[in-house]
Image (cartoon, helix red, strand yellow):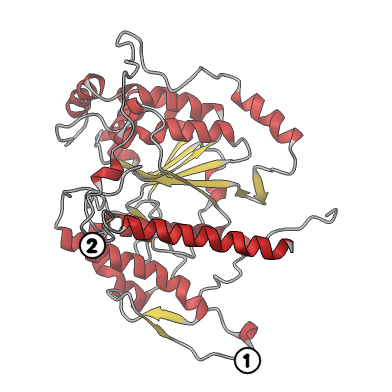
Amino acid sequence: SDAHSKRVESRRLLEEAQNDAAQGDNNDNKNYAEFDIAKILIDEEEGEKEKPDPNKPYSLGPKISDWDQQRSEWLKTNPDFPNFIGPNKPRVLLVTGSSPKPCENPVGDHYLLKSIKNKIDYCRLHGIEIFYNMALLDAEMAGFWAKLPLIRKLLLSHPEIEFLWWMDSDAMFTDMAYELPWERYKDFNMVMHGWNEMVYNDKNWIGLNTGSFLLRNCQWSLDLLDAWAPMGPKGKVREEAGKILTRELKDRPVFEADDQSAIVYLLVKERAKWGEKVYLENAYYLHGYWGILVDRYEEMIENYHPGLGDHRWPLVTHFVGCKPCGKFGDYSVERCLRQMDRAFNFGDNQILQMYGFTHKSLASRRVKRVRNETGNPLEVKDEFGLLHPSFKAVKVSASS
């Protein structure tokens, strides 16, 4: 019968595969630890790469000047993809990513995994979509600058997105209940953590942080990206631009141009052009420097609760300088890794408590039960209101 011949055929294929595996045993090392991973990591020959014309200024792409009009027409003809998913609730795309290669230390990829799991949890609770990038879209814009071509591509490909939220891979959500105050930003196109005085008066290169920021999908943002990008191309352009930034900005060390210094410089030089649409937020931690937060988690748990987002319970803890995917960081590896575990567990406890568990301590991977199982699961009290938060509720229209 047909079924019988199919069975015979699949058994034959299985036996062949087993024979192949047995023959391969002689020269196949099954030990991952002993295998030379460089064999796998060798990529296609780079060959003759197109060298950019050094006399032509760098461009992110063809100049677009009517994006607001194009996008508005698209939204009208595609009502099933609204750019606002509720009253004062924009459709948001959180964008993050990491190198296409494995990390340069044995645990870096484990910490990247924890970091994306953390972001997935926050975004699921807040009705935010995620894009994780592992491709270098433009060889010229490697390193810190890789986010710019990616952001532009995503804004133009997704007109339904109102805000794009860039977040570095070394930043984690530590307040799962905090919903951004979207209403506050209705007249602004870019939101970064920072201080007006530090940027505009002091010209300090750390007056704001680009590790976690919001960018509205509009013509203004495309123009900003075009103005931001010219210091980015690697090599001579980036090195020379770095010298200008070090000279012009307060306390900036000598190193090649980075996206954060470049935007500070742009805002200082052209405040009239950009400043009124940029909101420098410091009422909560859109980015929170880890060094001043991590040792206080226990105190926060003792005195406060999620949903505050500020120094009492920070929205984001950002491990600036730890470089967990690299060979070397700017701080003790042990302190960085221990504190990243604590930050992860601090955020994860807010997720686990919904299901009746918590980490044994902020330092522990292991969890313990914090309430007994019940035959009436829907009557369980949800301490932080995260199981069915109002900011996730979908308003169903009468017509549907």
Query: In the picture shown, does residue 334 fall above or below 103?
Result: below
| Pick the front one: 329 or 82 | 329
Q: Amino acid at mark 1?
A: Gly
For the question of whether residue 317 can be seen, the reply is no
Q: CA distance from mark 2 to mark 1?
A: 40 Å
Residue at horizontal 58 percent and vertical 61 percent from the top? 10
Q: Which residue is mark 2?
A: 337
| Pick the front one: 105 or 147 | 105
Residue at horizontal 39 percent and vertical 73 percent from the top? 304
| Element on which disc 1 rests | loop
Q: Which residue is mark 1?
A: 375
For the question of whether residue 238 can be seen, the reply is yes
Q: Amino acid at mark 2?
A: Leu
For disc 1, the neighbor class at 10 Å (few under 14, some 14 to 19, many from 20) is few
Query: In the picture shown, does residue 199 fall above or below 270?
Result: below
Relative image position of residue 103 (x, y in whole percent): 27, 49
Q: Report which quarter residue 365 is drawn in.
A: bottom left
Relative image position of residue 211 (x, y in whole percent): 35, 45
